[in-house]
Image (cartoon, helix red, strand yellow):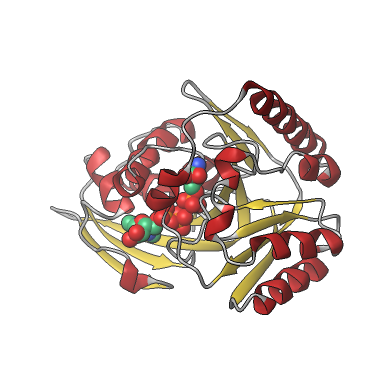
């Protein structure tokens, strides 16, 4: 038997659609696996009623199939499904690391990222690796078709999760299929600025690079109160605000010690918009860990 904890993640980070991802210290999924003749799944925890236990439809079950590693898989959900915090990815990442250990397959973390991404493909239609990469490797990650780059950044953030449901599959339908050259140039500049900020552990630079573009910004309209939440967070000292993943969560980058005031401002703005929400004042975290 092997048990693994894998963190929530915030993907895209405004300027890095399908490329950037950030591991959060909390919340997290915990997945326990035991060898079996065929894969079965049991789900407990937050949003369990919305998560299939059919292995072919659960990201952890798809990972078991990809690895040819049948197991009884117990998933304790700490990351709410359809949250924009990498819920499906947390289970996929934890299952990949756990089954790799249980069956002693010896795959590298980067190889496990590609396996876990196949789990994501089963639920969102595309094998985007920008959540599973930080969920496995931790820190800030940059995913390309060829490789994954990881940086152990230390940046204070707040993830604010409203009681709104946005599925990644649906949210991928609203993304424009092309952008203008001017926007491409400004987005590359923002992405480079954010990356420099991660390497320097500089929340000011990271915040400047967090600007949504037409790809990620297309989802703002799916989040009731987003504009007010962004303005309130910035007024409370956030250095940048963007849609987290496909939404509805909203990510704010903070200055050192600034999380609680930013979190309060975001919750108040959602409340004023008539939306219940919860906030996770946290920071960049580690990747999947065997317990
Ligand atoms: N192990 C899992 N954990 C969470 N969601 C899962 C899992 N397996 C399949 N799903 C499905 O994936 C969807 C949630 O994934 P997604 O829309 O990407 O949300 P998030 O933005 O939180 O990752 C839901 O429809 C859920 O039924
Ligand atoms: N790049 C993906 C990221 C989805 O993140 P999630 O946390 O909402 O699953 C996208 O934007 O579709």
In this rendering, position of residue 108 left or right of residue 39: right
Tell me which residue sits at (38%, 49%) in the image.
Answer: 169
Quadrant placement of the N terminus = bottom left
Residue name at image x 65 percent, y 75 percent = 273
Residue at image point 32% right, 49% down: 123
The answer to which of 168 and 257 lies nearer the viewer is 168
Q: Is residue 25 above or below residue 197?
A: below
When asked about the image quadrant of residue 252, the answer is: bottom right
Residue closest to the eye, 211 or 110: 211
Image coordinates for residue 78, horizontal then vertical, percent: 48, 67
Residue 120 lies in quadrant: top left
Residue 147 drawn above or below residue 282:
above
Residue furthest left as drawn = 37
Residue 277 left/right relative to 130: right
Q: Residue at x 46, y 62 (%)?
A: 29
| Residue 35: % across, % down | 23, 54
Q: How many marks?
A: 0
Residue 164 % position (x, y): 50, 69
Query: Hey, which quadrant is residue 76 in on the image?
Result: bottom left
Q: Position of residue 91 (x, y in %)?
A: 40, 55
Q: Nearer the viewer, residue 270 or 98?
A: 270
The answer to whether residue 232 is visible is yes
């Amino acid at each position: 038997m092997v048990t693994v904890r894998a963190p929530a993640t915030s993907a895209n980070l405004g300027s890095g659609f399908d490329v950037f991802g950030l591991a959060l210290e909390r919340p997290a999924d915990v997945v326990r696996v035991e060898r079996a003749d065929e894969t079965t799944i049991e789900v407990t925890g937050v949003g369990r009623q919305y998560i299939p236990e059919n292995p072919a439809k659960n990201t952890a079950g798809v990972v078991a199939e990809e690895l040819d590693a049948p197991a009884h898989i117990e998933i304790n959900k700490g990351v709410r499904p359809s949250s924009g915090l990498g819920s499906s990815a947390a289970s996929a990442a934890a299952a990949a690391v756990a089954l790799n250990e249980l069956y002693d397959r010896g795959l590298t973390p980067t190889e496990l990222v590609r396996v876990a991404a196949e789990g994501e493909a089963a639920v969102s239609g595309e094998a985007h690796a920008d959540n599973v990469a930080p969920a496995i490797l931790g820190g800030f990650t940059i995913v390309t078709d060829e490789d994954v780059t990881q940086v152990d950044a230390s940046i204070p953030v707040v993830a604010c999760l409203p009681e709104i449901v946005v599925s990644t599959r649906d949210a991928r339908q609203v993304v424009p299929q092309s952008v203008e050259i001017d926007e491409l140039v400004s987005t590359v500049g923002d992405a480079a600025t954010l990356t420099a900020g991660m390497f320097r552990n500089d929340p000011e630079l990271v915040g400047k690079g967090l600007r949504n573009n037409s790809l990620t910004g297309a989802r703002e309209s799916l989040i009731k109160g987003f504009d007010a939440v962004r303005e309130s967070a910035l007024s409370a000292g956030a250095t940048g605000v963007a849609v987290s993943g496909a939404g509805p969560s909203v990510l704010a980058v903070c200055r050192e010690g600034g999380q609680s005031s930013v979190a309060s401002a975001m919750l108040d703005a959602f409340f004023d918009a008539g939306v219940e929400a919860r906030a996770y004042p946290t920071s960049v975290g580690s990747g999947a860990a065997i317990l």
